[in-house]
Each structure stands twice: as structure tokens, then as C-alpha cells.
Image (cartoon, grey):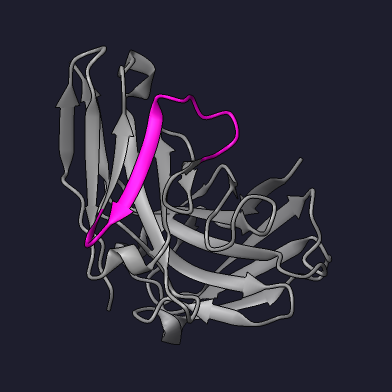
Amino acid sequence: SYELTQPPSVSVSPGQTARIICSGDALERRYVYWYQQKPGQAPVLVIYKDKERASGIPERFSASNSGTEATLTISGVQGEDEADYHCQTADSSGIYVFGSGTTVTVL
Amino acid sequence: QITLKESGPTLVKPSQTLTLTCSFSGFSLDEPRQCVGWIRQPPGKALEWLALLYWDGDQRYSPSLRSRLSLSKGPSKDEVVLTMTNMDPVDTATYYCAHDGPEVSYDAFDMWGQGTVVTVSS
């Protein structure tokens, strides 16, 4: 079965840039989606179709997808960005897969 | 505005069948390209996609759980029902339903319910 791998954690100082990698075989052939999840809350869609920001998402969030890796970048990290981030994709037969999730800690 | 809310038992015994209902508003599952999905998250762990119900009644299931899952439209036109058989303590998780449709992007969940916690224990 298809798998998406993420680093368990990323730490970043306020104002710096956080990059979260999502890896999967031939990932560039699929669209990748990113969700933000704060403690005790449901996930929120942040990025769709590899690089499009969802409604209400700040411009400091950007993303790309190339080769076997998709990257979510948070530029000028703020304390409110501290959360878990999950990547997700789907195959042509309608099977969805989530990544293992990454906890972003703002130091 | 799309909203979803999950409901069902908070505690089930091992080997029992879990039935969860997703009540939604702001869209119609009778309209083309509208879908409702189910996702779960064990405590402290990753999200796991379970199943997806399409507007036309078509269904997709996680390959690893396919034999235990069943989706249907509820008695009310604004409900989707998920059934999971032979529950085990490892199925303890927060269960979410979510909307997937053309408003933002297919193959993504643009709106989620608040989640419902299900504990499997004797």
C-alpha cells in the first residue's frame, strides 16, 4: 500500500522558516494536500493541489511538490503556527492516504 | 456554510459493531461530485483515512479495513452512516467525518466535523 513519510518533529525560532517534508514514491504524479491540526481540534485544510492556499490561510504558508517529496514552507513562523501538520494524497482509484504527521514547535 | 457533526457511542466493547452518524448541512449528497469521508486518529497518532461515500452511492474503503467497514446514506438525506465491525481496543480513536467536493478541491477534505471519541474497552 502507498505510504507518505514525514519527520516526527520540526523546531523553529519565531520569524524563521520551517520546512516540512512529505515523501512518497513518485509523489509528483499526485496532488498533495496539507492540513494543520492544533491540540484538541479537527484538522484544517491549509494547502490543496500541491501549492494552492485554502481560504483564510496566511501568505506565509506555501508549498511545492517535486520528484518524491512535497514541501510545506512556513515563512516568518509565528507562535500560532505551532501545530501538527499532515500531508495527504489520493490515487486514481479513490484511495486516500495521510502522512505520518509532523509536530512543529516554535522555540 | 458547510458544517458536519459526528455522533455515536463513546464506549463500545471488543467484538461489538460501531455505528457512527455524520450529520451535515450546507451541501447535498444528491448533488454531483459531493462526497463525505471518514478519518480517525488514535490518541497521539497520525490521521488514518477510513472511507469515502460519493454522491452517486459509490464507496471507497481503506484496503486494510475494507472487510470491516460499511458506508451508507442515512435515513435523513443529510446523514451518512459508518459501520465498523469487530471492534478492538486498537480502534480506540477520535473519528471524524469530513466534506470533499468541488467547492475547493476534489480529493481533499475542506471541512471537518469536530470529531467524536470512541473507546473500545470491556
Q: Answer with the quarter of the image where residue A27 lies.
A: bottom left
Q: Where is residue A51 in the image (x, y as percent from the top left)?
A: 43, 45
Residue A67 in the magenta stretch? The answer is yes
B97 or A54: which is nearer to us? A54
Residue shown at 48% from the left, 81% from the top: A93
Q: Total label count?
A: 0
Query: Which stretch did the figure color magenta?
Result: A53-69
Q: Can residue A39 be seen from the camera position used here?
A: no
B59 or B100: which is nearer to us? B100
Q: Answer with the quarter of the image where residue B30 lies.
A: bottom right
- In the rendered image, which quarter contains the N terminus of chain A? bottom left
Q: Position of residue A49 (x, y in %)?
A: 48, 54
Residue shown at 74% from the left, 62% from the top: B79
Identity of the residue furthest to the bottom in this view: B67
Q: Is residue B104 above or below residue B78?
A: above
- In the rendered image, which quarter contains the C terminus of chain A? top left
Residue B46 in the magenta stretch? The answer is no
Residue shown at 66% from the left, 58% from the top: B22
Q: Position of residue A95 (x, y in %)?
A: 44, 75
Q: Is residue A30 left or right of residue A58?
A: left
Q: Answer with the quarter of the image where residue B2 lies.
A: top right
Q: Can residue A31 be seen from the camera position used here?
A: yes
Q: Is residue B40 left or right of residue A5?
A: right
Q: In this view, does A81 lie to the left or right of A57?
A: left
Q: Position of residue A23 (x, y in %)?
A: 21, 58
Residue shown at 25% from the left, 52% from the top: A22
Q: Is residue A77 left or right of residue A8?
A: right
Identity of the residue furthest to the front in this view: A66
Q: Is residue B2 above or below residue A77?
A: below
